[in-house]
Amino acid sequence: MTTRTLPLAKRGFNFETFMWAFTRFTVIAMYGLILAGILGALTLSAQTGANFGDILYWAFFPNLAENPLGQIWMTILAKLMVIAFVLSACGHGVHGVLEILDDYFTSHLARRWSRNFVITYAVVASLIAIYAIWTS
Amino acid sequence: MGINRNVSLMTALGYKGESPFLTYILHRIGGSALFIFFTMYILVLLGVDSVNVVFSNWLFQIFMLVFGLFHAINGLRITILDLSPKLIEHYRTVINIEWVVYALVCSFAVFVVLRNAMGG
């Protein structure tokens, strides 16, 4: 089997191409943030004596747990990283969900409305997540 | 032009696409599961406590780990193949490696959840 690679110029830069690239870049960002998050939580765990699991639980559910980190800069950094991860996950998921829905909704109208709904949902959910994480 | 989809999930699973098709189906199921998880996560951030009870359930945790981990590991395989097109020639080998990695990671994760659920 031979490999076929097509330059970007010949693929055409439409919505699908853009979203394909966007999905790939966001997933790479997510893998990077997961790695940085685990290493960061392990480091903070060693420095502060806080439990590794408690740090991650507080980072993702700040409204349910006490902040195990003493210093403000750690708190801000952790919140920024979690917000970046949630935004990356949301952006990544938008195109995936749209692809699945496109396979089941066959009419143009249904596809347009499913697209509008999913994108609106992603924006609203992201805003809620940013607000809840930052203000908790 | 609309495309008709006349294939049920059960028929699709019986398709002789073998391992690559199975990864395709499982990737979609995993993505859908993670979408539900994300929605529940947003509800927890909004203060809906009942959702947190579901998060604490070990059966839910195992379900999310089985499908979520597959989505993550298969996504990594897709990304690697996308970024290194020459590897596509060996994609069946890559998928076999993926299954081994998934089995190891998933087994460990499920073991930890079960051990915690049984109070270990």
Image (spheres, coloured by chain):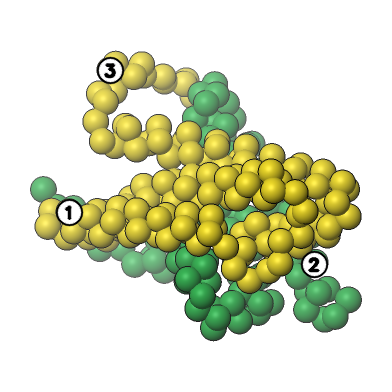
Chain colours: A yellow, B green
| Chain of the residue under label 2 | B
**Residue A116 rendering spot, x and y as whole percentages:** 22, 55
Q: Secondary structure at mark 1?
A: helix
What is the C-alpha distance between the residues marked 2 and 3? 48 Å
Of the pair A54 and A135, the residue shown nearer to us: A135
Which mark's residue is nearer the viewer, 1 or 3?
Answer: 1
- The answer to whether tags 1 and 3 share a subunit is yes
| Residue B86 seen anywhere in this rendered image of the structure | yes
- At label 3, the amino acid type is Lys
Residue B99 percent location from the top left of the image: 66, 49
- Inspect the image, locate mark 2, and give the three-letter code of the amino acid beneath it: Phe
Which quadrant would residue A37 be assigned to in this image?
top right
Q: Residue at x 69, y 43 (%)?
A: A73
Foreground of the two, A1 or A86: A86
| Alpha carbon distance from label 1 to label 2 | 43 Å
Residue at image x 75%, y 43%? Answer: A40
The chain ID associated with circle 3 is A
Labels 1 and 3 touching (C-beta < 8 A): no
Q: Which structural element holds mark 3?
A: helix
Residue linked to disc 2: B111
Q: Which residue is mark 1?
A: A112
Judging by the rendered image, the residue that carries numbered circle 3 is A10
Question: Within 10 angstroms of label 2, few (less than 14), some, or many (20 or more) residues?
Answer: few
Asked which secondary structure carries label 2, the reply is: helix
Residue A122 image point, x, y percent: 36, 55
